[in-house]
Amino acid sequence: MNTTKHLWSGAIAAMVSRTFVAPLERLKLEYVVRGEQKNLFELIKTIAASHGLRGFWRGNLVNILRTAPFKAVNFYAYDTYRKQLLKFSGNEETTNFERFIAGAAAGITATVLCLPLDTIRTKMVATGGEALGGVISTFCHMIQTEGFFSLYKGLVPSIISMAPSGAVFYGVYDILKSAYLHSPEGRKRTQNMSQHGQELNAFDQLELGPFRTLLYGAVAGACAEAATYPFEVVRRQLQLQVRAAKLGALATCVKIVEQGGIPALYAGLIPSLLQARNTKTLIYFS
């Protein structure tokens, strides 16, 4: 697959998946950014009552503007790094270690390039964010009041989290995929595909088949999200800080624990896991 197709496939998959899971993203941000204490079902009722059904998709356009380039870069970077590592090692097949390295490097690359949009998104959904207006006005406000580098708040925890997140996701997915393809059933399926490839429909042409593609994507997404979720909470809190009360990543983490205990680092984990499961699955399925 050439570069353009990689970028477009990643971007389109991100737009579809993010629109689909937008309600879960909204619920997660209510817990992480606004410090919501209600249980999940009560929060759903509150949002529905105050904003209606559209309230669950509030800010989805900004989210797409943020995630589409991120996923496109991540897709292309992972494949590029994986191929380079394969060429460097001289192996016929990528090892698990090389998959982890490629996934981590891809996550870091995409994070560095796309973090400003994520920071703007966080500012817009935080308390008082409505007064900032749209994407452009929020961007201008941050530049004027806090300087250009305010767009990179939370860069350190972002990199720390995206490296293992990408590594865990791609690593787990490829391990599951490799294990299946080397099983008797997988070998039989591969052989059948090579013999009757042109006669199969789009779903049957998937190496793993539709069910395993969905299942493995869901498992890999959940593993990656759970492993790095505390970094997500710390990053969001860093992005909300103003210059006068700015704390480092470690100090912010300590403050979160002091105020809410260890569970505070996992605020909104349930909707986030549901979101990650569906997002990763849809991206691989797109």
Image (cartoon, rainbow, N blue to C red):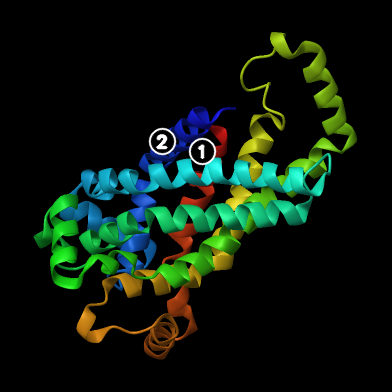
Relative to 15, is 286 on the left or the right?
right
The image shows residue 42 at horizontal and vertical percentages of 31, 63
Q: Residue furthest top?
A: 199
Relative to 84, is 256 on the left or the right?
left
Residues at marks 1 and 2, CA–CA distance in whole angstroms: 8 Å
Task: Using the image as rendered, state which of residue 192 and residue 118 is in the foreground.
Answer: 118
Q: Tell me the amino acid under the disc marked 2.
A: Val
Q: Residues within 10 Å of mark 2 (few under 14, many from 20)?
A: some
Residue at 61% x, 59% y is: 223
Q: Residue furthest front?
A: 88
Q: Is residue 63 above or below residue 235?
A: above
Q: Earlier in the sequence, mark 1 or mark 2?
A: 2
Relative to 99, is 12 on the left or the right?
left
Residue at 46% x, 71% y is: 157
Residue at 39% x, 42% y is: 68
Placement of the N terminus among the 4 image quadrants: top right
Q: Is residue 241 above or below residue 161?
A: below
What residue did someone put label 1 on?
282
- Which image quarter: residue 264? bottom left
Please tell me the numbered disc located at residue 97.
none
Asked if marks 1 and 2 touch (Cβ < 8 Å), the reply is yes
Q: Is residue 21 above or below residue 147?
A: above
The image shows residue 176 at horizontal and vertical percentages of 74, 46
Q: Is residue 93 above or below residue 38?
A: above
Q: Tell me the amino acid under the disc marked 1.
A: Leu
What residue did someone put label 2 on?
16
